[in-house]
Image (cartoon, rainbow, N blue to C red):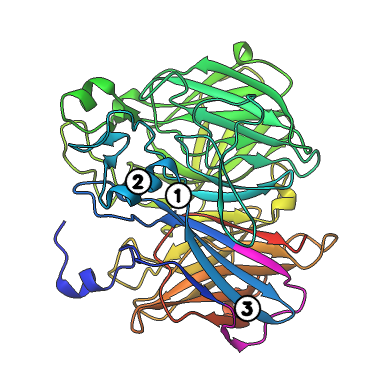
């Protein structure tokens, strides 16, 4: 896709080549005193250039903004995965992405994991996640890498970057795709209780091999979306795209009772689409309602013959999926709630899997030609109606907005949104703190960094322990 030089200069995807500690950051405005803890963010930041490697497969770099008593500090560290360590020792890239080794890479080096997608805290452990490998445990504060955690052998194979914590039971529900090996149609599914013990782990087959980035958990059900961004070992072996858009395969969503087994899964059919991220889902009588960010065609990946997907259709919009559990139909409904381009949806996580009345996501500025750059935040109610919108100055971009409640017993939505903003003109980043229910007022406080935080994926707030 042709871009002019100005647009080239204006993106924030290139990695930063350093690790840093900034113990005292300038704060513009006033940080709420109740914000005591750390915002951890994760994203791709390749240690070395690797020709042709997809943006998704850059080495994970963690960015930690620590807020305490109105003060702010920052630290960033690469996750020391086996791949990162081997490349650091070699002084060059050894992998080309999606597990492909480069010429001259050591024979015994097989682990291309990058731990670059999310970072979550559960059962006393801070975990850096990506969907192809086990969780990597990180030491809070220092960001030192402790290594893979397989929960005393209770978990094996790929582990999603989007596990869900049940706000009622405290259990972590997770899945993994490519569970029988690369580009296979098997999924794993399991749960880890609030104390960190694996209580379930099993595998099952899906209709076809698909990139399953996120999944859906409600009070009593788990839903697995199998959407036609397909994986093919045959393609990969012949030099074609390992992952490609095949809409003729249609969309499937498997619905399973949390108390049931994989044999009970009911497969619902729908119009071909792609979804990276779920906002929330809940049960409503004999139905399941799920709010997602739906693409008509998968972005960032081509058709099997290498042709790009249609940019007009490769944008996500807030969409509602409805599943009728009565057995009368095997089709699920897909209804767009807004026409605004957006991604990275979040809620007040205390309502995860339950009916929620507030949601937020990063959006593109409809008045700017720079399609694809997320440059604002939208606040929506439980029906998807916009309650507020904030747009950044032209050229600036924003990360996923993370909700932090004012206190444990505060009403849903009462708290703040934390988002990292790239200032294009100054080529550096701010941590912006918004009042979550009044985002139109703009940031209540800005924590200013002297360098930029490259565009990344996901983050989470961990309150002072």
Residue 237 percent location from the top left of the image: 20, 23
- The span shown in magenta is 23-39
In 3D space, how far apart are the residues under numbered discs 2 and 1 (Cα atoms)? 8 Å
Quarter of the image with the C terminus in it: bottom right
Name the residue at 80% across, 38% down. Answer: 169
Residue 50 percent location from the top left of the image: 23, 49
Answer above or below: position of 231 versus 53: above
Residue that carries the numbered disc 3 in the rendered image = 72
**N-terminal-most mark, 1 or 3:** 3
Residue 349 percent location from the top left of the image: 69, 52
Q: Secondary structure at mark 2?
A: helix
In 3D space, how far apart are the residues under numbered discs 1 and 3 (Cα atoms)? 24 Å
Q: Residue furthest front?
A: 89
Q: Are marks 2 and 1 in contact (CB under 8 Å)?
A: yes
Q: Secondary structure at mark 3?
A: strand
Q: Residues within 10 Å of mark 3 (few under 14, many from 20)?
A: many
Answer above or below: position of 268 versus 392: above
Residue that carries the numbered disc 1 in the rendered image = 116
> Is residue 120 highlighted in magenta?
no
Front one among 433 and 277: 433
Quarter of the image with the N terminus in it: bottom left
């Amino acid at each position: 896709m042709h871009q002019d030089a100005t647009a080239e200069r204006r993106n924030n995807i290139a990695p930063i080549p350093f690790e840093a500690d900034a113990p005292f950051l300038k704060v513009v405005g006033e940080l709420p005193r109740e914000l005591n803890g750390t915002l951890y963010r994760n994203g791709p930041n390749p240690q070395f250039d690797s020709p042709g490697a997809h943006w998704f497969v850059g080495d994970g770099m963690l960015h930690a903004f620590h807020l305490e008593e109105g003060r702010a500090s920052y630290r960033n560290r690469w996750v020391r995965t086996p791949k990162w360590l081997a490349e650091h020792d070699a002084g060059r890239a050894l992998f080309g992405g999606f597990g492909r080794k480069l010429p001259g890479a050591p024979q015994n080096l097989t682990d291309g994991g990058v731990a670059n997608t999310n970072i979550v805290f559960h059962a006393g452990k801070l975990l850096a996640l990506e969907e192809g490998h086990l969780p990597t445990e990180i030491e809070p504060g220092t960001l030192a890498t402790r290594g893979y955690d397989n929960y005393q052998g209770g978990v094996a194979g790929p582990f999603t970057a989007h596990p869900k914590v049940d706000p009622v039971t405290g259990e972590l529900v997770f899945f993994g795709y490519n569970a029988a090996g690369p580009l296979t149609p098997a999924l794993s599914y399991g749960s880890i209780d609030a104390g960190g013990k694996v209580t379930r782990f099993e595998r099952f087959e899906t209709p076809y091999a698909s990139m399953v980035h996120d999944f859906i958990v409600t009070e009593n059900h788990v839903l697995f979306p199998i959407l036609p961004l397909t994986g093919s070992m045959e393609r990969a072996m012949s030099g074609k795209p390992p992952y490609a858009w095949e809409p003729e395969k249609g969309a499937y969503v498997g619905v399973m009772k949390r108390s049931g087994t994989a044999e009970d899964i009911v497969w619902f059919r729908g119009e071909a689409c792609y979804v990276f991220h779920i906002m929330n889902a809940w049960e409503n009588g004999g139905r399941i309602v799920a709010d997602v960010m739906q693409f008509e065609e998968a972005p960032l990946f081509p058709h099997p013959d290498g042709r790009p997907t249609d940019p007009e259709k490769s944008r996500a919009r807030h969409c509602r999926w409805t599943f009728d559990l009565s057995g009368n139909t095997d089709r699920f409904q897909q209804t767009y709630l807004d026409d605004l381009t957006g991604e990275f949806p979040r809620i007040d996580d205390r309502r995860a899997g339950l009916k929620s009345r507030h949601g937020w996501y990063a959006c593109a500025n409809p008045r700017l030609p720079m399609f694809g750059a997320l440059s604002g935040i939208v606040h929506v109610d439980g029906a998807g109606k916009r309650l507020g919108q904030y747009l950044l100055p032209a050229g600036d971009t924003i990360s996923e907005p993370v909700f932090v409640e004012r206190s444990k017993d505060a009403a849903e939505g009462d708290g703040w949104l934390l988002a990292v903003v790239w200032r294009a003109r100054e080529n550096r980043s701010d941590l912006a703190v918004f009042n979550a229910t009044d985002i139109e007022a703009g940031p209540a406080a800005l924590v200013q960094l002297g360098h930029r935080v490259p565009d990344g994926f996901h983050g989470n707030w961990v309150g002072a322990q």
